[in-house]
Amino acid sequence: MDMSDFDGIKRDISLKVEHIFEVYEKEHYCMPTMEEFRTMFNEHIDQYVGPDDSLKGAGLNISSDTKQRREQKVWRVVNELEAEQRFLRSD
């Protein structure tokens, strides 16, 4: 993944990651565990990668390998953003 892909994905996803942390902390008075966070973000993954149905329906005919590569890029960015949020909120 080149840096422009990474920066673009990071820009698109950063607010969602921050929002998940804020809402969880407001409701539970603590940060989500890694598993809880990933479960919550996974509910939004199609928003950034696209579900199989819509990709084929739009005439894009994207292979499962392409979808998997796109999803891996998103999760790499999400993992970095999650680590940043944990660091910023650890005080």
Image: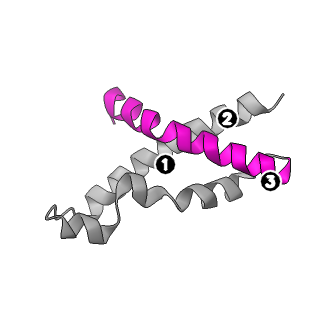
Q: Main secondary structure of the magenta part?
A: helix
How far from the left and from the top, in percent, is residue 29? 86, 47
Q: Along the line of sight, which residue is nearer the eye, 29 or 75?
A: 29
Disc 3 on helix, strand or loop?
A: helix
Q: Along the line of sight, which residue is nearer the eye, 22 or 5?
A: 22
Q: Residues within 10 Å of mark 3 (few under 14, many from 20)?
A: few
Q: CA distance from mark 1 to mark 2?
A: 15 Å
Q: Which residues are magenta?
A: 1-29
Dot 1 amino acid type? Trp
The residue depicted at 54 percent of the width and 38 percent of the height is 15
The residue depicted at 58 percent of the width and 37 percent of the height is 81
Asked whether residue 17 is drawn in magenta, I would say yes
Q: Quadrant of the C terminus?
A: top right
How far from the left and from the top, in percent, is residue 10? 46, 35
Residue underneath mark 1: 75
How far from the left and from the top, in percent, is residue 72? 42, 50
Residue underneath mark 2: 85
The residue depicted at 62 percent of the width and 44 percent of the height is 19
Q: CA distance from mark 2 to mark 3?
A: 17 Å
